[in-house]
């Protein structure tokens, strides 16, 4: 197993957003998380790299397992260990505006991996070529389209060679005509056997790329399984309602 999450709970003040989540994912597989807005999808994803600290439960990523209890402070070492194992792609790209495209990809290789500038530049150039932007390294983010910026975001997430790539609604900030170029890059990574967790509203993409779909509602997983089963033959009324609304 690459990911094993047990009994995960998270509240914001009095609002309990995750109410006991259990998820497992094998290495090389793609997990897609769907569900209505506010159901806890992004919070679950952000817990996986400790952008949010769970109140209770266990997260195991690759060879590192962390236990959470309310009141226990998570150490910066634990945060670093989990972050090193994950690469995050944000909805709004979050690129450094004053750094060039290639410098954005190099950044974590220099600060986290302690690579030399020369090595970082070489591997960043390869990553940019991989996402179809080999000729845009010296541009600044604002000179690129949203789709291109998000592809830089993907190259940057891969730069530290994480075990798991996490995508938080990677296409929802994009104009419709730019969505497919980003989904194509993600699909290619799936074919190459990257372990990925993707929060998305793109149901066709979910059906196409997922090995496992998790449908959340109100802080619970209400259905999970093979995309064919969850998307085409949901069992619960809530799942049927959610999926019917989309078609
Ligand atoms: P989804 O991704 O399914 O739309 P989220 O995980 O973003 O759901 O949010 C779940 C609930 O938690 C929502 O009600 C949201 O308003 C709330 N929430 C998310 N982040 C915070 C936060 N940092 N502080 C307070 N409430 C939050």
Image (tube, rainbow, N blue to C red):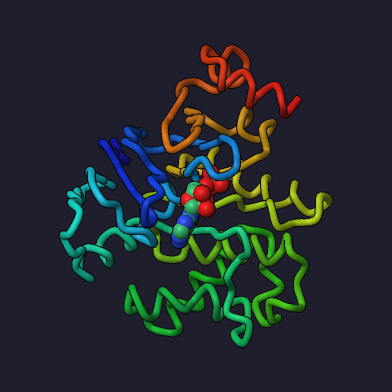
Tell me: residue 152, above or below residue 140: above
State the residue in front, 162 or 65: 65
State the residue in front, 185 or 64: 64
Q: Position of residue 76 (x, y in %)?
A: 23, 71
Q: Position of residue 212 (x, y in %)?
A: 47, 28
State the residue in front, 142 or 9: 9
State the residue in front, 36 or 23: 36
Query: Which residue is most to the right?
Result: 177
130 with respect to 8 (left or right): right
The N terminus sits in image quarter: top left
Residue shown at 33%/56% (left/top)?
85
Count of all numbered marks drawn on residues in the image: 0
Q: Is residue 42 visible?
A: no
Tell me: residue 233, above or below residue 36: above
The C terminus sits in image quarter: top right
182 with respect to 209 (left or right): right
Q: Is residue 221 visible?
A: yes
Query: Which residue is most to the front?
Result: 14
Residue shown at 41%/45% (left/top)?
17
Q: Quadrant of residue 46?
A: bottom left
Query: Which residue is most to the bottom?
Result: 98
Residue shown at 68%/67% (left/top)?
149
Q: Quadrant of residue 75?
A: bottom left
Residue shown at 26%/51% (left/top)?
55
Tell me: residue 246, above or below residue 102: above
Q: Position of residue 56 (x, y in %)?
A: 23, 46
Q: Position of residue 232 (x, y in %)?
A: 62, 15
């Amino acid at each position: 197993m690459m990911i094993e999450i047990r009994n995960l709970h998270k509240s914001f003040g009095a609002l309990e957003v995750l109410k006991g989540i259990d998820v497992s994912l094998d290495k090389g597989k793609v997990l897609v998380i769907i569900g209505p807005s506010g159901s806890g999808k992004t919070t679950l994803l952000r817990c996986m790299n400790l952008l949010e600290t769970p109140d209770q439960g266990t997260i195991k990523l690759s060879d590192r397992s962390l236990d959470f209890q309310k009141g226990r402070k998570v150490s910066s070492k634990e945060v670093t260990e989990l972050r090193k194992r994950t690469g995050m792609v944000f909805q709004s790209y979050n690129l450094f505006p004053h750094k060039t495209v290639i410098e954005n990809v190099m950044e974590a290789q220099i600060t986290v991996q302690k690579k030399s500038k020369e090595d970082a530049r070489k591997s960043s150039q390869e990553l940019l070529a991989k996402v179809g932007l080999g000729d845009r390294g010296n541009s600044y983010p604002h000179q690129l389209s949203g789709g291109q910026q998000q592809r830089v975001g993907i190259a940057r997430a891969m730069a530290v060679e994480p075990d798991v790539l996490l995508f938080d609604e990677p296409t929802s900030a994009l104009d419709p005509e730019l969505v497919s170029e980003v989904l194509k890059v993600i699909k290619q990574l799936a074919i190459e056997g990257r372990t990925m967790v993707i929060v998305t509203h793109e149901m066709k993409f979910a059906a196409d790329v997922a090995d496992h779909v998790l449908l959340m509602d109100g802080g619970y997983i209400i259905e999970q399984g093979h995309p064919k089963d969850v998307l085409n033959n949901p069992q619960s009324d809530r799942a049927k309602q959610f999926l019917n609304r989309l078609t």
